[in-house]
Image (spheres, coloured by chain):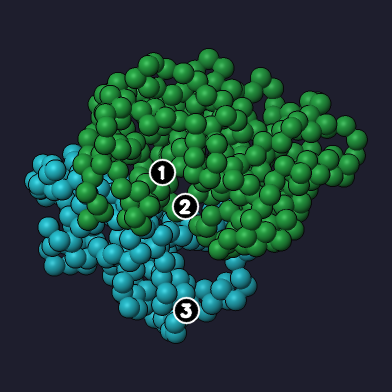
Amino acid sequence: MLGGFDYVCARSVDEACRLLAEPGDARVLSGGTDLLVEIRNGLRSPGLLVDVKRIDRLRRLETSGAELVIGAAVPLNVLVEHREVRRSFQALADAALSIGTYQLRNRATLAGNLCNASPAADSAPVLLTLDARLSVASPDGMRTIPISELFTGVKRTCLGPADVVTDVRIPTPSKLRRTAFLKQQRIRGHDLAVVNVAGSYAPGDRALRIAVGSCAPTPILLDPVDASGSHEAIAERVVELAEAATEPISDVRASAAYRRAVLPVLLRRLVERLLDGGGDS
Amino acid sequence: MSHEIFLTVNGQAERATVPASMTLLELLRESLHLTGTKEGCGIGECGACTVLLDGLPVTACLVLAVEADGCEVRTVEGEASDGRLSVLQQAFIDAGAAQCGFCTPGMIMSARALLERSPSPSDGEIVEAIAGNLCRCTGYESIVQAIRRAAESLNGRETRKSGPSLAVNGQAVKRPRRAKARDASRADRPRSTQGGGG
């Protein structure tokens, strides 16, 4: 047994928000692959889990207008296999595929990866470079949060206790855009990132969008990087910005020194991929 | 608080009254006495508790029993029928793919799901499909071989030998030449099995 909590399978977003607003430390349960581990390890002891997986609206995955809408209860494996995701957001598919194992990805969700707010969340750097937004329901109504405002610290977000993320929205590109995701990990199987980086660039644009994970209390979106000059010059600008914006720590996965050494290597590879369109890692 | 749930386990309708905090793994092992499914790490890392939930492999230690209400669950106990092992189970025995046996039920369920979504998997697909199942005995070679042989038996024909190269989490991995040579020598001596630990 995992603890003393109760469980409700919410049938609507309104019902979920109402239950979460009641006193008693209720938590949203989506895939549960982080939350149930935290409960087992004694890091959380919620009074109520509000399961949102069976709310239809949270299960949709579709292009709506100029956005890709990823429902908060869509399992990562469904996202990874989606044609539009593979076509326009390869880096998102790569990042999602690097989270956990096949079994976990049948449960875990993109919204869950974000709300868990790990500094190493693999989907976060990609979504930062793609200007993703979260639709959030609360007892006061709906609002939209840019992902750049979501993370406030290690495992902390700007979301309130009665907030329910209903979907993650990504603007669909109007022109060809390259995206890339690279992750350094201790073993080639499933493992958390030691350093993870993502970028997006449309050839002809004046700037590259680059984000870095696992090197600060939150994933970090760098200021847009001037795309003029040689590849080496651009890469050096990216490295300089990233080093100024991050403050890696030592933990069980790597030392701060190792992270500082790996970060520029990954960033140079990333920039090369974005500018050349392809190549290997 | 207790919840009444209805689910199908290996084709059989079950009704259970479960506390909210009971995992699907606990329901299977302790209430339904289906102890084939094992608890390894309890945090979704090792895959020993892999079962199929509505056809998809999941780690039963990270699913609440109450979340499985209305679902179809399949465990290793659903493999054999009428006292006969499934082709997949027999292939594991023939290939020497079980040593201590603790990972085997989870391995078989991951393999079952793979063969259902990809009846003629490449070695790369096989490795990817069992990447979430840890085995500390076999070194995996014999397990990959067992799944390959099961696919061949079920299809009654050879599977793709020249499929994509090995891939782990989407990253291509070169298959060691030694392994290829071993495959070739096995093809000549189909009864040989791989010995030794990992």
Give the Cα separation between the discs numbered 2 and 1.
9 Å
Q: Position of residue A83 (x, y in %)?
A: 52, 32
What is chain B's hue in the picture?
A: cyan
Which residue is disc 1 drawn over? A108
Q: Position of residue A101 (x, y in %)?
A: 45, 53
Amino acid of disc 3: Gly
Which residue is disc 3 drawn over? B198
Give the quarter of the image for residue A167.
top left
Q: Which type of secondary structure does the marked residue at label 1 adopt?
A: loop
Which disc, if any, is residue A100? 2
Q: Residue furthest front?
A: A23
Q: Nearer the viewer, mark 1 or mark 3?
A: 1
Q: Position of residue A125 (x, y in %)?
A: 61, 39
Give the quarter of the image for residue B30.
bottom left
Q: Earlier in the sequence, mark 2 or mark 1?
A: 2
Looking at the rendered image, the quarter that the N terminus of chain B falls into is top left
